[in-house]
Amino acid sequence: MKLVEAEAEGPVEGDAALVTPPVPPHRRVSVSLLLTLTVLVGTVVAIYVAFPARHNMLLTVALERHREPTPAWDLVSPTEPELHAWAIGLVGKDVPLPKGPLTITGARALMVLDRRAAQIELTIANDRITYLVQHHRGIAPDRSERVDSDLRAVAWRIGKYTCVAVGPNATATSWLAVFR
């Protein structure tokens, strides 16, 4: 079967019709597949370039804040009831706070991924520990851990909260016991 081109200038009256063969079906499919793959790959690459990865962002922020030399605290050396009331107002009801043999140095509010988080600095057995807690949204891993030079950062979920503790890697087993 042959197709007649509708847009082609036809023969002068009396001449034979101009007949062209059709485009083979495999060529149409391969061009369509190539176009689809190009658009799909381009979209995925654009998304990864435009939007940075956000997994473990709280863990990264906790490591950065732990390295700050002199943070400006909202509360300086608060008592446990003061800290608990402040954390409820900032993060929410039933906020998990560390308990045990520790000294609270200070606390301040942070914004991480456009949500409020509480940063608390503690001293546990002569180790300076940074503790962050935030009401999590979406899917978060149950536990993640990162060792960054001489520091260890551990993140875990408790109910609707994500908690992160950062301290010296050498004594991690002793200070992590307070958070279990």
Image: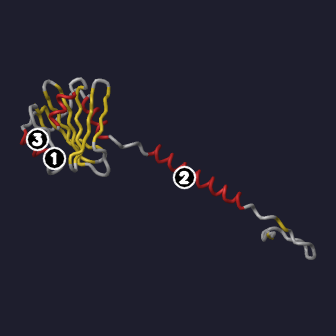
Task: Determine the residue positioned at 28% across, 24% down.
Answer: 150
Q: Which residue is mark 1?
A: 95
Q: How is the image coloured?
A: secondary structure
C-beta proximity under 8 Å, tags 1 and 2:
no
Q: Foreground: 22 or 45?
A: 22
Q: Secondary structure at mark 1?
A: loop
- Measure the alpha-carbon separation of dots 3 and 2: 50 Å
Find residue 83 and name its label.
3
Label 1 Cα neighbours within 10 Å, binned few <14 / some 14-19 / many ≥20: many
Q: Are marks 3 and 2 in contact (CB under 8 Å)?
A: no
Gap in Å between the C-alphas at discs 1 and 2? 43 Å
Quadrant location, the C terminus = top left
Q: Is residue 25 above or below residue 72?
A: below
Report the side of 49 relative to 135 (left or right). right
Question: The N terminus is located in which quarter?
Answer: bottom right
Q: Which residue is mark 2?
A: 40
In percent of width and height, residue 166 lies at: 24, 32
Q: Which residue type carries mark 1?
A: Val
Few, some or many residues within 10 Å of mark 2 (<14, 14–19, 20+): few
Q: Is residue 125 above or below residue 43?
A: above
Which label belongs to residue 122?
none
Mark 3 crowd level (few <14, some 14–19, many ≥20, 10 Å Cα): some
Q: Where is residue 20 shown, x and y percent of the image?
A: 82, 65
Q: Position of residue 12 (x, y in %)?
A: 90, 73
Residue drawn at x 32%, y 40% as measured from the top left:
57
